[in-house]
Image (cartoon, rainbow, N blue to C red):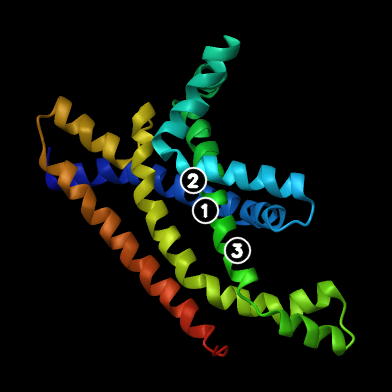
Amino acid sequence: MTFLQVTLFLLEGFKLSLLIFAVTLLCGAPLGLPIAFCSMSTFKPLKAVSKVFVWIVRGIPLMLQIFIIYYVPGLLFEYPLFAKIDRYFFLEYGISDTGRIVAVLLAFAINYACYFSEIYRGGIESISQGQYEAGYVLGLTKSQVFRKIVLKQVIKRIVPPMSNEIITLIKDTALANCILVCEIIKQAKELAATQALVWPLFYTGVFYLLFVGVLTIVLGRIEKKLDYFKS
C-alpha cells in the first residue's frame, strides 16, 4: 500500500475516533452537572449514592467499564443486547459494529460525566460564601445569584481542568478497539496483520498530535476570552 492509501485507510478509523470524542463530550459534559448537584445535595442519601457512584466509575479503568457494559448484560441476563443491535443494523442497513459503538459511547459518556462532575463541583465550591450573601443582600434570588454572579466565575475556573480532560478524551478513544471497534488504532492493527505493515501503528500518533494541537489552540483562546475575571 502507498503512503496515501494508508493515510486514507487510517483516516476512516479516525473519523470514528472523532465521533466517539464528539458524542462523549456532548453527552458527558451536560450529564456531569446534575451529578455534581447530587454530590453537593443537602439530602444525605442522594449525596451518598452520588459520591459512591462517582467513586466507583472513577476508580475502575475505562477499558474494564467498556467490557462490563458490553458483556455483562449477556452474562447476567443471557441477553446479548449489543450483539443483537450489531446484527440488526448489519442485516437491515449493512452497517457493522453499531452495537459495539453504542456500548463504547455509553461507557465513555458515563465515565467522563463523573470526571466532569467533580470539576464542576470543585468550581462551584471554590466560590466564597460571601459572594452568595452579597447577592442576597442585593435582593437576588438563589437562582439569580447562581446565574449572574457565580456561574461565570465557575466557568472561568473550570476551563483549564476541563481542557485537560477534553485532550485526554481524544486519546482515550483508542480504548474502543478493546471490543474491536474500528477506530484508528484498530485500523492500524489490521494493516499490521494483513499487510505486514507496522509503521502505520506509529503513524497514528500524527493524527492524535494534530488534533490535540487544534484543541489546544481553541481551548487556549476560550481561556483568554474569560480573562475578564481576575481572582
Residue visible at 35% across and 30% down? 178
Q: Is residue 24 left or right of residue 204?
A: right
Q: Amino acid at mark 2?
A: Arg
Q: Residue furthest front?
A: 44
Q: Residue furthest top?
A: 78
Question: What whole-number distance in Å separates the C-alpha atoms at marks 1 and 2?
Answer: 7 Å
Q: Position of residue 30 (x, y in %)?
A: 64, 56
Element on which disc 2 rests: helix
Residue 147 occupies which quadrant of the picture? bottom right
Query: Are the residues tagged 1 and 2 within 8 Å (C-beta)?
Result: yes
Mark 2 nearby-residue class (10 Å; few <14, some 14–19, many ≥20) = some
Q: List the residue tagged with mark 2.
A: 58
- Is residue 87 visible in this depiction of the protein? yes
Q: Amino acid at mark 1?
A: Tyr
Element on which disc 1 rests: helix
Q: Amino acid at mark 3?
A: Tyr
Establish if 148 lies above or below 143.
below
- N-terminal of the two: label 1 or label 2? 2
- N-terminal of the two: label 1 or label 3? 1
Mark 1 nearby-residue class (10 Å; few <14, some 14–19, many ≥20) = many
Q: Is residue 96 left or right of residue 121?
A: left
Q: Is residue 85 left or right of residue 18?
A: right
Question: What whole-number distance in Å separates the C-alpha atoms at marks 1 and 3?
Answer: 9 Å
Residue visible at 71% across and 79% down? 129
Establish if 190 lies above or below 31.
above
Query: Are the residues tagged 3 and 2 within 8 Å (C-beta)?
Result: no
Question: What whole-number distance in Å separates the C-alpha atoms at marks 3 and 2?
Answer: 15 Å
Q: Residue furthest right?
A: 139
- Is residue 99 visible in this depiction of the protein? no
Q: List the residue tagged with mark 3.
A: 120
Mark 3 nearby-residue class (10 Å; few <14, some 14–19, many ≥20) = many
Q: List the residue tagged with mark 1.
A: 115
